[in-house]
Amino acid sequence: MLYNSKSDWTASQSKSIMLFGMSGLGKTYISELLRNNGDWFHYSVDYRIGTRYMGEHIADNFKKEAMSNPFLANLLQTDAIYISANMKFSDLSPLSSYLGKPGDPSKGGIPFKEYLRRQRLHRDAETNAMLDTVHFIQRAKSLYDYDKFVCDTSGSIVEIVDCNDKNDNVMKTLSQYVLPVWIEGTEEHTEELVKRFIKSPKPMYYNEKFLIECWDNFLKEKSISESKVDPNEFIIWGYRKLLENRSPRYRKIAKDWGITLKASDVATVRSEDEFMIDLHTKRPHLTIPEWSVEDIEADESKIGLSGSPTKVKSVSSIVLTANESKVLTDSDSDIEGMIKELIKHQNYRFTAINNIIL
């Protein structure tokens, strides 16, 4: 891990973070806020994908469309015009337009086989763009003398890493150079994202196995052939499923590799100082993780009061059995020292419960 404690983060002159989560929850907002502050280098993974790895594919797709127009075709063939994508941090529509949507060509769709081919190109591009983060951290320092770096990831980062593999190459590499920060939404955020997507559906990148399952299920549910699929209807149908599929994987990455910030907190941030306070309160790697019933796959009938084989009738005393005492101040070093000691010596015993009924 790059930062092992809050004091490590505070003391470090160079600060590098990687923001991840669903699109629309504040990754680019925070990245631009930090960049506009003047001393943060903003690396956009989506921009890198579109310019470095997919730029030629995108431009060729534009040219193919232009060649269907005799007037433009003649100009292209004589090199009288030049066609390229105008990618921006705030407008990635050239990349989205290339990914496309599967379905009826008369409604703007492309054959599913071609859609899969483009998805695979995107997977390779995103993997490479993520690993390029290391190069850009070094480049930001050596060329421009930036000590602070923010990596603005694609919402599909969970599709190119294995969240259950502690040796995943992308995460293992990046965790040595950046602090991963998940911007977590709520059910309300999910509903808002869905409403926004319905109004303006855009192409997405999916895990291939998940995509094929969604496609097959959609065809069966609607009882239609591939060529009759309404492209927008399919991606809207699959969007909520995609959100539900990604959420637990974002959580697992944050749990194993980084920290979590609430989207509602991020939305109120108006300066670098406010954002840094949010990060400070997380105390990287000293925060005790919370495990839900879903995380441990527990049987709900066997947990809580209803599942307990014992009942506490009363608590009459609490006696510390340790034979020494320590006085701690409210300093970070004292608090961190106490936590580390508790973790190291897990055999502290407390006598607290009497009269247990079996």
Image (cartoon, rainbow, N blue to C red):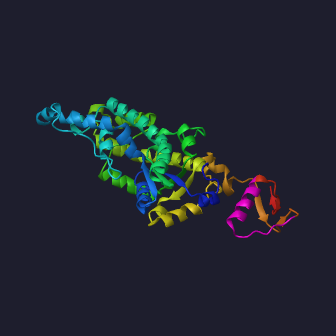
Residue 24 relative to residue 273: left or right = left
Q: Residue at x 60, y 47 (%)?
A: 256
Residue 309 relative to residue 301: left or right = right
Q: Residue at x 76, y 68 (%)?
A: 328
Indicate the quadrant containing the C terminus: top left, top right, bottom left or bottom right.
bottom right
Q: How many marks?
A: 0
Picture coordinates of residue 67 (x, y %)?
Answer: 18, 33
Q: Residue at x 32, y 30 (%)?
A: 114
Q: Is residue 292 part of the magenta span, yes or no?
A: no
Bounds of the magenta segment: 324-343
Does residue 100 show up? no
Does residue 62 show up? yes
Picture coordinates of residue 289 (x, y %)?
Answer: 63, 54
Q: Residue at x 66, y 56 (%)?
A: 286
Picture coordinates of residue 122 (x, y %)?
Answer: 39, 37
In-front residue for pair 136/86: 136
Task: Name the magenta segment's main secondary structure.
Answer: helix
Q: Quadrant of residue 156?
A: top left
In-front residue for pair 270/9: 9
Q: Is residue 168 above or below residue 155?
A: above
